[in-house]
Amino acid sequence: MIAYDVIKELREERNWSQEQMAERLGMSKNGYAKIERGES
């Protein structure tokens, strides 16, 4: 399993949106979405 898959899985287990996860990490939603897509 690749790191971005693990991150997405953790977010989904908590029923958090990408926006909620980004806020918790102190980053933009777009920046976080790129991580989930493996673009970062």
Image (cartoon, helix red, strand yellow):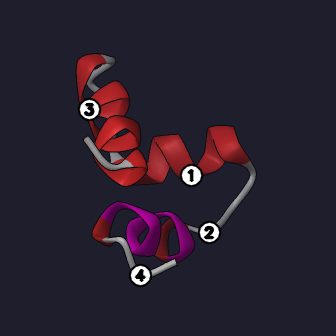
Residue 16 in view of the camera: no
Q: Are marks 4 and 3 in contact (CB under 8 Å)?
A: no
Give the residue at the far bottom of this rendering. 39
Q: Residue at x 41, y 81 (%)?
A: 39
* Residue tagged 2: 28
In this orientation, which residue lies closer to the viewer: 11 or 19?
11
- Determine the main secondary structure of the stretch shown in magenta: helix
**What residue type is disc 4 on?**
Glu
> Is tag 2's residue or tag 4's residue first in the polypeptide sequence?
2
Where residue 22 is drawn, which disc sits there? 1
> Is tag 3's residue or tag 2's residue first in the polypeptide sequence?
3
Q: Looking at the picture, how far across and down is residue 2, in whole percent?
A: 32, 49
Asked if residue 24 lies left or right of residue 18, the reply is right
Residue numbers of the magenta segment:
31-36
**What residue type is disc 2 on?**
Ser
* Residue tagged 3: 9
Q: Looking at the picture, how far across and down is residue 14, in whole percent?
A: 33, 18
**What residue type is disc 3 on?**
Glu
Nearer to us of marks 1 and 3 is 3
**What residue type is disc 1 on?**
Ala
Q: Residue at x 45, y 53 (%)?
A: 19
Crowding around mark 3 (Cα neighbors within 10 Å: few <14, some 14 to 19, many 20+) is few
Q: Are marks 2 and 1 in contact (CB under 8 Å)?
A: yes
Crowding around mark 4 (Cα neighbors within 10 Å: few <14, some 14 to 19, many 20+) is few
* Residue tagged 4: 39
Crowding around mark 1 (Cα neighbors within 10 Å: few <14, some 14 to 19, many 20+) is some
> Is tag 4's residue or tag 3's residue first in the polypeptide sequence?
3
